[in-house]
Amino acid sequence: MTVTPLGIPRRLLEFTIDGEPVRAPEGSTVLDACRAAGKDVPTLCEGDTLRPKNACRVCVVEVEGSRTLVPACSRRAEPGMEVRTDSERARHSRKIVLELLASSVDLSTTPQVAEWIKAYEAKPDRFGPDAARLDEEPKVDNALYVRDYDKCILCYKCVDACGDQWQNTFAISVSGRGFDARIAVEHDAPLTDSACVYCGNCVEVCPTGALSFRSEFDMRAAGTWDESAQTETTTVCAYCGVGCSLTLHVQDNEIVKVTSPHDNPVTHGNLCIKGRFGYQHVQNRD
Amino acid sequence: MDLHFGDSKPTDDERAAVDALLGPPESSWEGADRSDADLRWARGGREARERRDLLLPGLHAINDRVGWISEGALDHLCRRLTVPPAEAYGVATFYAMFSVKPRPATVLHVCTDLACAAAGASGLCARIEARLGPGSGASVERSPCLGLCERAPAALAIKAGEPVRTAVSAPATVEAAVLAASAPDSAPEEPPAAMAVPQAGQDGLVLLRRVGVADPESLDDYRAHGGYTALRRAFALGPAGVIREVTDSGLVGRGGAAFPTGRKWQATASQPDHPHYLVCNADESEPGTFKDRVLMEGDPYALVEAMTIAGYATGAHQGYLYLRGEYPRALRRLEHAITQARARGFLGDDVLGQGYAFDIEIRRGAGAYICGEETALFNSIEGHRGEPRSKPPFPVEKGLFGKPTVENNVETLVNVLPILTMGAQAYAAIGTGRSTGPKLFCVSGSVDRPGIYELPFGATLGELLDMAGVRDRLRGVLLGGAAGGFVRPDERDIPLTFEGTREAGTTLGSGVVMAFDDTVPLPRLLLRIAEFFRDESCGQCVPCRVGTVRQEEALHRIVERTGAAAADDIALLREVGRAMRDASICGLGQTAWNAVESAIDRLGAYE
């Protein structure tokens, strides 16, 4: 029999979002409440399986009485709060954040960002042609995944997934400081010389496509990557007895990448090298 | 944690440096040769990881001995402390004073920040670089403010070895700086700290009364000049009584944020979670600030006593003194003072026989302005990258090592001594109603007598500038450092209080008062400020990481322009500045545009 733990009953907090009264369970974030109320608050560094890092600042909202804007993803809801998600002040900061990112990072594979840039009337070009960019070349140093740090917004999600929040491998960290900060393994070595175990859980959480399957990277380079032609099939990994859920992304009858549902109560989207990358035997037709 | 290490091995020197700090390794799990016994057990878990906070001291030990941190040395340190090499690499590359690439054993840091720039630092630096080229055994690095503004331009030489040697050259000439870099031992001794205090020895001083009067090396002399009477009074009052006195005195933090000290102490003392920690923030890095250095060099025992009182009041038994890495003399003085105090029973298991245990550990910063932010400082002590945490939770609830922590600036703590010796009422009678007590001001730039001045709150800017002998052709005065704001030369009537500066639309900050005449073009100074923030941004949040870069680029474009030619970029600066102020995680990004904005609006920098 399956028993679903209900947990301790949680008190409902009453506060307002954009002037409308809302109720949210104790412990929820402002972002949770905004989403429940149907408010569209953009997020980049927020991850459904990770603790909020609030590094990107694109989710900022205005809270009455707060000197600065507040990151919705990490601020806990409090009773009596007056939250404004769409004030001129919040919109201005979001617009500038989008401009700063788009003028320095390649956001071409970041979902939704093009819509936000339009919605907030952001103009990344206005910093001029000489505006500093990351200017990183893709690091293709192994057969399984590619690190294209020209697309990295430094959201820390890969570091958190590799570290104490999920994988406990600690193969990567942020190195350097300020605009020169980059995700790197020790001594900025190739991945093959690092502690990486190729679980691909960093690829799973990357919001911008900076980390991608080698198969996806090669197909994009060849111009054959076509998400509209892909099907997604969720199945169970056959390697061991844990039974992790796999979602196979198939294009032209070939598996092109593997993800895992984040709402799986056991694995939360995490896999090991076998489930993530060990699918070639399935399509071995000789 | 299953750590992965490469094949690089440490040199004997590197191994010795780490072992001198940590002691010899106990087993092969910590890097010793493998024995049969090591095959039958595994060192791991919490016990193996609990020394993570020794990562920064370990990196210092290697850098002090060799001058840079090699792969083998970093791996060895990681093995000793059970720290993942990737994380340690992230920490080592965070700090400006460390290098993970080979470099000469001697590094000469030449300050090119505001006060030194106004004193001709860029030309000086170029001439020094011409003399100390490749093969000279020294590398020259352009440095942010070294906290020696009263003797601008300044240079600090650090020569790795056993022991590490340092020499300060200020005011620096090419000859003196080259001598300091090539032979730190034979460089002339620095003038005493009291030379930075034009009022030294005058009657009526409160915070500076012992500077230049009592021997900073001698505990007996400190006691002969009233030392340790405040601690005795604290023991007589009890912890709650001390907090009441501090609250009644109206003391607010002197580091820049002006938070009421008594309230902070009360909030920490009342936390049920234990242990409590006391942290003294001596990471004085705001350009133009050098008051804490002068206090620590000139009256080190006062800080030791004040920390003991703060620890007693808030229920802490361990105090950390996070000292700026660029302050070698303050480090020596405080190490000596703490050793003396410990030997004489003023620190230790039973302070003054009162049954209260308290000790102080010094932790050196390694060149990161951001570590002056209170939560970044905790991360730095804990052996992580010095990135600010998001608040709430606040330090009084979850601070250092996740425990209730009270963190105070050096000057704030030293104010506690007169509060207890004079009594809260008498102390509160100094200054104005809302800004009580004496205040230290760091005056530098275009003045005849730069240095630290102690004045009661309420003196005006003009009075202070006259005391320091301000020179003619004043173009502007920067209050509060790079995070502060410029005011016009005619705004002499601004009262130097927290409320007075706020009403005038500027800030007191950490007490910086830098006077600039018209010899250095204002746009150049603004560009230097922007460069400072771009360099010192930790990189965590987008508004600050990219915003400081865009700010510098725009200021670069308009450095020679005025009027309509600069208008578009000024409009852009305003928009980016507003987002940095509103959406950055911490005070660094929030204030990175302040000085530039004030120079545009108040001084008409581009008109």
Image (cartoon, coloured by chain):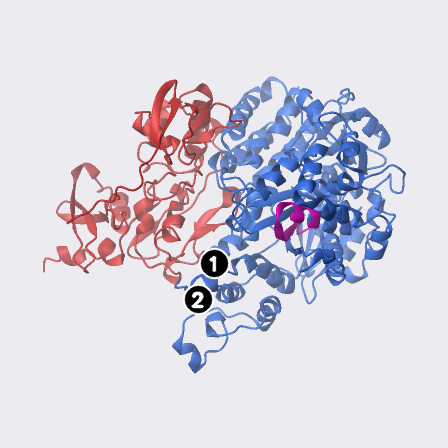
Chain colours: A red, B blue
For the view shown, which residue lies furthest in the bottom direction?
B36
* Tag shown at residue B6: 2
Element type where label 2 sits in the image: loop
Q: Are marks 2 and 1 in contact (CB under 8 Å)?
A: yes
**Residue bounds of the magenta highlight:** B308-326
Q: Residue at x 86, y 47 (%)?
A: B212
* Residue pointed to by mark 1: A187
When asked about the image quadrant of residue A231, the answer is: top left
Residue type, mark 2 in image: Gly
Quadrant into which the C terminus of chain A falls = bottom left
Q: Is residue B313 magenta?
A: yes
Give the x, y percent position of residue B267. 58, 39
Q: Is residue A221 magenta?
A: no
Element type where label 1 sits in the image: helix
Residue B127 in sight here: no
Instruction: Give me the chain letter of mark 1.
Output: A
